[in-house]
Structure formats: C-alpha cells, structure tokens
Image (tube, grey):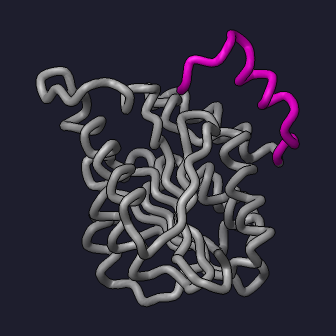
Amino acid sequence: MLDFPDGIDEYATAHTTVPDSVFDDIAVDVQSTGAAGMMSGRTVGYFLNTLVTISNAKRVLEVGTFVGYSALMMASALPEDGELITCDVSEEFTSIARKHWARHPAGEKIDLRLAPATETLDTLSPPFDLVFIDADKQNYPVYYEKALGLLARRGVIVVDNVLWGGRVLGPDDPEQDDEQGATKSIKTLNDIVQADDRVVNVMLTVRDGMMLIRKRDAHLS
C-alpha cells in the first residue's frame, strides 16, 4: 500500500458502502491464512463492483481468486445470466472462497478454474467485458497479453498492485527484488502497457495502484 497519512485508508473504507455480512465473514476467515494483506477489501471490491455495473458487463474474468472477496463483489453486480470465471492454484485459499460463495446468491455465477492461469487462459473463448488481474506478479506481462486477446472491443482490463508499495520508483536491482522478481515484472508490465499502441490506459492511485486498460478505438478516444 502507498504511504498515505495515517488513518487515510481507514477513512476511505469508512466512507464506502458497507457490504453484505458475508464479506465481513471472508475478512475474518482470511486472518487465519497469514496473508490478510492480499485480500482486495471493501474499497477495491466496490471499485470493481462499480466497474461491472457501469459497463453492463455480462462476462468477467479474474486472474487470482485468493479467498474470493473480489470475485463475489464483481459477481454481485452481474445480471442474472452473467458469468464470472476466476483462476487460481491454491486449494487452501479457494476453499475459503467456496464456503462463502455458497452462502450468497451471486456465488452461483462464479466458475472457479483450479489450475495455472497461464493454462486456463488458453482454454477460454472471447469476449470478456472485464478482466481483473491480481495474481502472481512475475507472470503479469503474460497475463496481460493473453487477457488482451480475450477482451471485448469495449471491454476493460484492470491490473492491481501496479505501484507495488512505491517500489516501482526504485532502481532495478535483482539482488534486492522481492517475490521472485515481482518488482521487475510489475515495472515491465507498466512499461509494456504504456508503450502498447493497441490500448489506452490510465494508472490510478487506488490503494496499491490500479491500471485500467481498454482497446484503442477511434470512436472511443
């Protein structure tokens, strides 16, 4: 997370709509995993929920399920015939997701694919109206390219953690990099998108940074 003044994240959360109690239960369960900081949370969740709503999305793809908070937030905004496919490799984390999805009506719209996302993405057919990428950082450039090929003409790709706690501002130093080269991969992805004349993109300072990407189209520019 970026270095905002103390309390500002809590302030933003307190001024975001309170979700159904099932989301609080997911937040409680994630504490037992030791990886609570990886969960999207209320502000990012409702940001994604709003994007699904205003874009009239019917098909959503998520790369990185974790405990299912963001998937359920997005599925909650889908129409009755909507579909959300989410990819992950962790039985442990997604077992929490499945438990809580089963308690919510929108859970029926979620299709979990438990396999490496690089493989799952190759099995999917376009178009997807919204793609959310929030998984292992070293594969971000791969996920982006595959997601772009699956994206609807007026669809949007959302990439999380593109500011990576401010580490994207530091020099490239393999000896100091984290999580198997996560910082380098995120910086590489950011540069790839910025130089890609197939798309239009905007980077937002929402929590740890979010990039919105759409296909370049003369009628939309």
On the image, the x and y values in percent for residue 138 come to 25, 48
The image quarter in which residue 25 lies: top right
Q: Position of residue 10 (x, y in %)?
A: 75, 22
Query: As rendered, which of 149 and 87 lies closer to the eye?
Result: 149
Q: Is residue 152 above or below residue 50?
A: below
Q: Quadrant of residue 50?
A: bottom right
Q: Which one is nearer the viewer's eye here, 91 or 134?
A: 134
Q: Does residue 190 appear left or right of residue 29 in this picture? A: left
Q: Is residue 124 left or right of residue 119?
A: right
The rendered magenta stretch, by its main secondary structure, is classed as loop
Q: Is residue 122 above or below residue 43?
A: below
| The magenta stretch spans residue 115 | no
Does residue 103 appear in the picture of this structure?
Answer: yes
Q: Quadrant of residue 8?
A: top right
Q: Range of the magenta residues? A: 1-19
Q: Residue at x 69, y 10 (%)?
A: 6
Q: Residue furthest left?
A: 175
Q: Nearer the viewer, residue 217 or 106?
A: 217
